Amino acid sequence: MRENTMKTKLAAGQPVFGSMITFPSAAVVEMLGFLGYDWVLIDNEHGSITIDLAEDMIRAAEYSGTAPIVRPVGNRPEIIAPFLDRGAWGVQVPHVNTAEEARAAVKAVKYYPDGDRGLFSGGRPAEYGFNQATPDYVADANRNTLVCLMLEEVEAIENIPELVNVPGVDVYFIGAGDLSQSMGYPGQQTHPEVQALVEKGVQQIAAAGITAGCSCPDNLVPHYLELGVRYFHNTVGRLIQGASNEYLKTMRSAADGL
């Protein structure tokens, strides 16, 4: 398996910035890589990306130098493993609330002795078994595959002291959108109570020496960097919206002078 450049950056304490895509497009993933994104989140949970459609997106990410991470629809081995077998460099597992659920995610991602992922050394991540002995591939995969777990309910934030003791987790990502709903403020990510709970959570995660991630408006990124967050992503839709708004504003302003 190729070296996971994003894990290397995170291990050095560097922030990484990605973009989430919910529709199948290898070309857009490739563009994100060439634009300089550290990673891309290929979203199986909320979009129309299936296992088979994800494979070319993963390949495009590798080619353009960005880390392909998949968000599966659930925390089950039969959902997670197929994306890894097609070459994903890691997963961002949604709705993890307990240490038991965290351990289950790690077991689904890692081979023995770190987990119990079904062994297959003849696929893409193992270069189809052509160039590496199986034990070496297993060791490389366990070292390079990233485990990011999403904390999206109040229960998850309350359980952070137990969650941070689960071995094998690289990133705990607080999803403020679902968290706001769990708190009774759906869609109000910047509500003071929601932000207070997000801040509490990321500080606990960072204090435990684990990489913290969170969803937040772009203007709050500097604040969360100061709190220790190192794992961020925006969305392709928001990128298109922002660039389009700016373009149309400029063009229509010019046209108004005609």
Image (tube, rainbow, N blue to C red):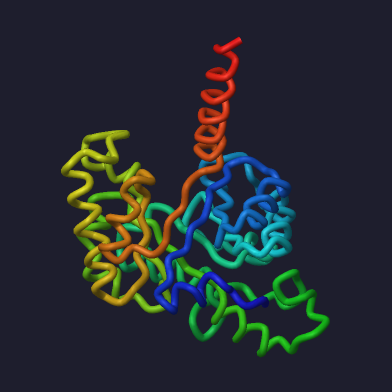
34 relative position to 39: left or right: right
Q: Relative to residue 13, is residue 215 depicted above or below?
A: above
The percent coordinates of residue 203 (x first, y second) are 23, 65
Query: How far across and down, in percent of the image, does residue 113 sit?
Result: 51, 86
- In this orientation, which residue lies closer to the viewer: 74 or 174? 174
On the rendered image, what quadrant is the N terminus found in? bottom right
**Is 188 placed left or right of 17 in the picture?**
left
Residue at left offset 53%, top offset 70%: 6
Measuring 39% from the left and 57% from the top, which residue is drawn there?
150
Q: Quadrant of residue 141?
A: bottom right
Q: Residue furthest right?
A: 130
Along the horizontal axis of the image, is 201 left or right of 9?
left
Q: Give x and y (percent) for residue 78.
A: 58, 60
Decide: is 201 above or below 123. above
Residue at 62% x, 78% y is: 3
Relative height, residue 204 to residue 40 (above, below)? below
Total residue callouts: 0
Picture residue at 67% right of the left edge, 89% below the top: 136
Q: Quadrant of residue 212?
A: bottom left
Viewer-proximal residue, 15 or 20? 15
Q: Please tell me which residue lies in front, 112 or 177.
A: 177
**Residue 4: % across, % down:** 58, 74
Image quarter in which the C terminus is found: top right
